[in-house]
Every structure is written in C-alpha cells, then in structure tokens.
Amino acid sequence: MRISVVGTGYLGAVHAVCMAHLGHEVSAYDTDAAKIDRLASGASPFYEPGFEEMLAEVLTTGRLHFTHDPKEAVSGAAVHFVCVGTPQSPGSNAADVRYVNSAVAMIAEHADSPGLVVGKSTVPVGTAQRLSDELAGTAASDLLELSWNPEFLREGKAIEDTLHPDRLIFGVTSEHAEKTLQQVYSRLIEAGTPHLTTDLATAEMVKVAANSFLATKISFINAMAEVCELVNADVVTLGRALGYDERIGRKFLNAGLGFGGGCLPKDIRAFSARAGELGASDSLTFLHEVDKINVRRREKAVTVAGAMLGGDCLGKNVAVLGAAFKPNSDDVRDSPALNVAAALHLKGADVRVHDPRAISNAKAIFPTLTYCETVEDACRNVDLIVLATEWDEYCAIDPVAFRSLVRQPRLLDTRNAIDRDYWVGAGWSVYALGRGAMAPTTKAE
Ligand SMILES: NC(=O)c1ccc[n+]([C@@H]2O[C@H](COP(=O)([O-])OP(=O)(O)OC[C@H]3O[C@@H](n4cnc5c(N)ncnc54)[C@H](O)[C@@H]3O)[C@@H](O)[C@H]2O)c1
C-alpha cells in the first residue's frame, strides 16, 4: 500500500520505518527539514534501540522515502498517518492541537486520490469528529475520510511495540475505513494481534484512559511510598506483594521518582482540561491528585538529598546519574531526573550530570548544569550520588570500586534500582525512596 506519514518525531519516524518494514511504500514528511535530512541519510534524530538498524534496512529496499515537499508525501497515498505532536498548550493544561489541525489541512490541500486520513497523535476527545466535519467542508471531501488509530508504543521499546502491539484500535465511521486499516495492519492481525473497531470518540478515549490508568498506578504506589516512609515499611516489598494479586498485577508498581516524558504528564492534564470543557471535571478530579503525588516525588528527592548533605547544598558536589525521563531513551521532556538535578543546582550544589544518551538534549534545556562524559567523571569527589534514571549501567556500578572515587559514600536511590544491602555492606549510606535511610554496615575509609 502507498502510505504517507506526516510528522517524523518519536512516533512518526518509528511508524514510517515499521510500515516500510511490513512491506508498504512509505513517504514521510515533517516541517522540520533538518530532521527529514537526518532520517534520509540513515541517522536517527533520537535514540531508540534497534531503530537505526531498521531504518538502514528499509532505506535499502527503496520502500521508505523522506521528503521536504508535503505534496510529494501526500500525492497518490491511500493512507495518511498523522503523527505530529500535541504538546501541553502554553499557559494552560489543555493539549495544543494546532499541529494536528495544520497536518490534516495540509493533507486535504494536496490529496489527489482517494485516501484515509488516520490520526495517531493523542488528542482531546472530540477532535477526530471535529476534523472529520472540517474535512467534509474542504475541496477534498470526496477524496478523504478520517479515522483514528491511537498509538500505545513506549519509547525504548518502540519498534517491538509497533510490530507486536498489545492491541490495535480502529476508530472509524465506515466499513471501508475499517477494511483499509485491516489491510494496513494485515500482517499484525494475521499474527494474532487483537483489534477492536470503535467509533471515533471511543478510539480517542482508549488512549487517554489507558494513560490515565498507568499514571494512576504509578502514583498509587508512590502514595504508598509516602506512607511507608512514615511507618518504616518497605514499599518495594509492598509492590511485590501486591503484584501477586492477579487483579492488581505487578507492572507499574515500582515506587520511585514518578513518571515524566512527552506523554503521561501532558496527557493526564489535557484529559482533565477536556473533561472540564465537557462539564465532567468531577469525574477526573483524581487525576489532579495523581499529578500532585507525582510532582511531590521530585520534591521529596530534593529534600532527602539536602538532608543527606547535612541540610546545606551550598558548595557540595553532587552526581546526578540519569537525565532521560526513563532508561533506553534520550527523551528529556518533563524528565524527573533533570528536574531534580536543576533543583539541587538552584540550591547551590555543584551538580554533575551523566546520561548514556541524553546529554545533548539535556544541555539544550539546562545549559548551566555540568555534564560529564563518564559515570566516573560525574562521581569523582562528590558528596552524594543521586541515581535518577535506572539505566542498566548505573544498576551495575560496583560500590566497592566507587567508594574510593567519591568524597562521601552516600547514595540516594530514587528508583529503587540498586541492591541496597550490597551497597550498605560496601560502606555506603543509602536512602531509597519509599524505603528510607540505611547506614553503612562497614566504615568508610
Ligand atoms: N513519543 C511517544 O512515546 C508516543 C507514544 C504514543 C503516542 N504519542 C503521541 O504521538 C504524538 C507525537 O508524539 P512524538 O513524541 O512523536 O512528538 P515529537 O515532538 O517527537 O514529534 C512531533 C513531530 O511533528 C512535527 N510536526 C509538527 N507539525 C507538523 C506538520 N504540520 N506537518 C508535519 N510535521 C509536523 C514536528 O516537527 C515533530 O518532528 C503526540 O500526540 C504524542 O502524545 C507519542
């Protein structure tokens, strides 16, 4: 099938590459010309495991083409995927849908053959119907039909999630649209991927409801962490114990620094804002609490770090390990790790940040922090290490070797990622969020 992909960020670039991998002829367009050039040369504008390899593979087949020309991207395509950003609006919690509006308008302007416009961006409920109505009033009304096919991929596992999704949701208004989407995803459907056909609003709801549920689960265990710390209970054991209950499930019950990134925070805020517009604010007031609990984890980490430094950050050296909002990504949008690093810097600490992949993105947002090439450089002579993103390489740090590197053997594990007993056995004072402080069982040299 001939497919156009509009918007080649984390979602669109992965989608374009995976569609070409599945055998479609794909033409991808983005308003960011530098991004298109990078992708066309086989280089990824972001870090995503396995992405560059698959990009190289599909570029050699000739099935994937990147273009600066919107007309060239859209012309002759039977399906147009809309993958542009829907960030939080400046000055409000609502989603900024202007990029989606202009992408759909652009497709309507250039379409020259019958096609299905397929929204993948996460949008406020009701957007798809509005866009569908607007399309009906354009010159392309005879050619184009709109549907919504929300995306659930996780950064760090984006390829796997696109090629082996948990489910496919087809929000459509006609049998023809449903059949077209079944054709696009025929290989995944043949492989047994569950697929549900819905109306437009339900498809939009599936995405925002799923993200709300996941955010709630994370904030639930973090709320439990707040209580655990007051009664000297252990939130890690609590999460494990709860997870054995099949009705609850183990996933997303890891207490720590909370969620961040380009999706969950802005999606729950946008959903609440939309509920307000619809007169249903009461239904989603809990999401405000979910958000507050999440933000409190960052504040808690900064408070604990200050206490571990003797109540005064000024003049103290602190290593913050991690800048990305989660491991296996270079995405620093609303990153809890970077927030903590910046807050400690503001309190007067000399903060050295390390991240295996996200340093250049972090520098663009917080240029005044010190960035280090190696974990050792970041940790040399510090008074405190803050483990803020659970990259494997941080979890594998040898506390015995690192004890001679630092000025004070103190670790704040905000992700409950390290073997705490091993570290305290090696002479470290460890504070794990939701588990409290543990003094070293051997003396620091
Ligand atoms: N990143 C994820 O993990 C993920 C997962 C599921 C859903 N989503 C949703 O997918 C959407 C995109 O997210 P993202 O993370 O890829 O964002 P992103 O910021 O990485 O990419 C968005 C891209 O859209 C481009 N763009 C903006 N307006 C355009 C236009 N009119 N025409 C062509 N290109 C245009 C931008 O230049 C940018 O490259 C959002 O709605 C997001 O909530 C993202």
Image: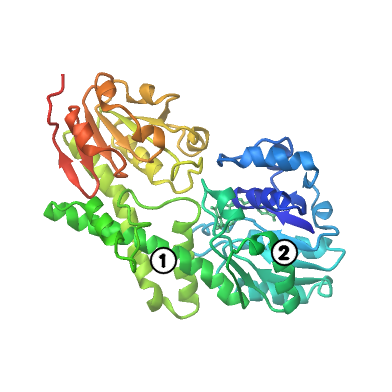
Residue drawn at the location 58% of the way across and 76% of the way down: 201
Look at the picture and state if 413 lies above or below 140. Answer: above
- Residue 287 image position (x, y, % from top left): 38, 67
Name the kind of residue labelled 2 in the image. Val
Quarter of the image that includes the N terminus: bottom right
Could you tell me which secondary element the residue under label 2 belongs to? helix
Is 133 placed left or right of 163 in the picture? right
Look at the picture and state if 118 lies above or below 336. Answer: below
Q: Nearer the viewer, residue 109 or 121?
A: 121
Residue drawn at the location 50% of the way across and 79% of the way down: 278
Which residue is disc 2 drawn over?
104
Residue at the far front: name it.
191
* Residue 306 visible somewhere in the drawing: no
Of the residues under marks 1 and 2, which one precedes in the sequence? 2
Q: Quadrant of residue 243?
A: bottom left
Q: Quadrant of residue 106?
A: bottom right
Callout 2: few (<14), some (14-19), or many (20+) C-alpha neighbours within 10 Å?
Answer: many
Number of numbered labels in the structure image: 2
Quarter of the image that includes the C terminus: top left
Which residue is disc 1 drawn over?
213
Look at the picture and state if 29 lies above or below 37. Answer: below
